[in-house]
Image (cartoon, helix red, strand yellow):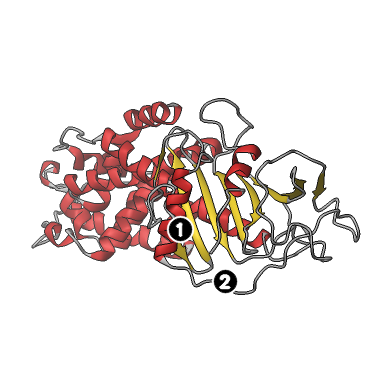
Amino acid sequence: MTDIRQTLEAAFDDEPPLSLDLAAIRRTGRRRVAVRRSLTTVAALATVTAVCVPAVLGSSGGGQAGGPPPRAVVTGPAVVLSPSNPPTAGSWTWSASPSPSTPPRPPSAGRAAELTAMLAKSDVLPNVPVAGVPGNPGGPWEFVVVPNGYRAVAAPTDRPGRQVLVTLEVRGFGCPEPVPADTQCVVRMTANGGALVVLDYRHERTRVLTVSAQASDGTLFSASAVDSDHRADGTGPGARLGYEELAKIATLPGVSF
Amino acid sequence: MERDREFGEFVDARALVLRRTAYLLCGDWHRAEDLVQTALTKLYVAWPRVRRDGSVDAYARKILVRAAVDDSRRGFRRRETVVESLPETSVPGDAPADFDVRAALAALPPGQRAVVVLRYWEDLGVAETARLLGRTEGTVKSQAAKGLAALRRLLGRHVFEEQT
């Protein structure tokens, strides 16, 4: 009797030397990891979008309506909402402008280019090296037209798995009610009486921090820092963008449809 | 980068074995190496998770086998390895040195071949083989028996014990 395993081993008598290209495997693997992280980011952003479902809190009108968007961001009194601390009537000292139900002007490539130039000339962008994001039609910090408005994305090259997203959309301003799981919503007052909505979504190793402000036409201008491999809050070069940096972007003057 | 270091160590230790399994499944060394390269790329992507789960070997085997099975279903290259004639069936007592296990494996239907390789080369159980190939345990048992019978017939006196 011959053991079958020994019999099968007889098939290897002309075995050539191994010539696997380990470097090529790693390169291809890294590319796929990057694409996968992009997809994770898309999923996280979809969650953020869901979180931002119109839920305007405070409806007395007035407030910052008609005025310029808040510029000087101050970490003022914050109202923290979470599933364990739902909003209650009368808990707000600010009010938002009514949000339009349709774009004030149809989104156009021309306006996207204007917004791109506006962003590029501003001093609100973080001073970090960035690249475009695979699958996104625009370059880094370049606005493109999306179904609900405009979007610009950039990926800091010093930390894989991170992206920064800037959007201008027709969307209500305020915290959602109820606040979804894994999400904390904070409303921060600015020095000039305006308000910023800060959404902090954390699920497993994905963290998305979004700061939104109302643009002058009542639409929503948001900046999000997406980290698909979040482990801990970091500081220093390469750290994820924080509230202050995102707020600088979200309060860029002159942004509108 | 820790992933690269650990992954490199795994490749150094296991690539040869993986290529042998691929070769038994497809019968072509070049194709076997392509399959291993494809499987290792997928493994690299999933490395943190499978490393954490302690299932690196099992995952590598799974994606390799599935890639080989998919490849055989597509029919590419398999035509190149189909033998024109079956090896002569020798009678028990013949000289043992002239059989060709490669030709015998190539003569097996792809399903039987995969089952034989997984059961008797990779030493997987019936349940694990069934799960890996997406078949029932009954089918695996049946194909293992038929595959062994065919190999016995094709390889003549080199009869082996059936492992259950």
The tag on residue B39 is none
Foreground residue, B8 or A91? A91
Q: Is residue B118 left or right of residue A180?
A: left
Quadrant in the rendering for residue A255:
bottom right
Task: Report the chain holding disc 1.
Answer: B
Q: Residues within 10 Å of mark 2 (few under 14, many from 20)?
A: few
Quadrant in the rendering for residue A114:
bottom left
Write down the residue under mark 1.
B130
Q: Is residue B50 left or right of residue A193?
A: left
Image position, residue B96 (x, y; %): 14, 43
- Element at badge 1? helix
Which residue is located at x 30 percent, y 54 percent?
A: B68
Q: Is residue A78 left or right of residue A234?
A: right
Task: Report the chain holding disc 2.
Answer: A
Image position, residue A47 (x, y; %): 62, 57
Foreground residue, B161 or A254? A254
Foreground residue, A29 or A147? A147
The kind of residue tagged 2 is: Pro
Which residue is located at x 77 percent, y 49 percent?
A: A193
- Element at badge 2? loop
The kind of residue tagged 1 is: Ala
Quadrant in the rendering for residue A221:
bottom right
Q: Is residue A217 above or below residue A91?
A: below
Write down the residue under mark 2.
A104
* Viewer-side label of 2, 1: 2
Image position, residue B143 (x, y; %): 36, 62
Image position, residue A170 (x, y; %): 60, 67
Regarding residue A137, the answer to whether it shows in the image is yes
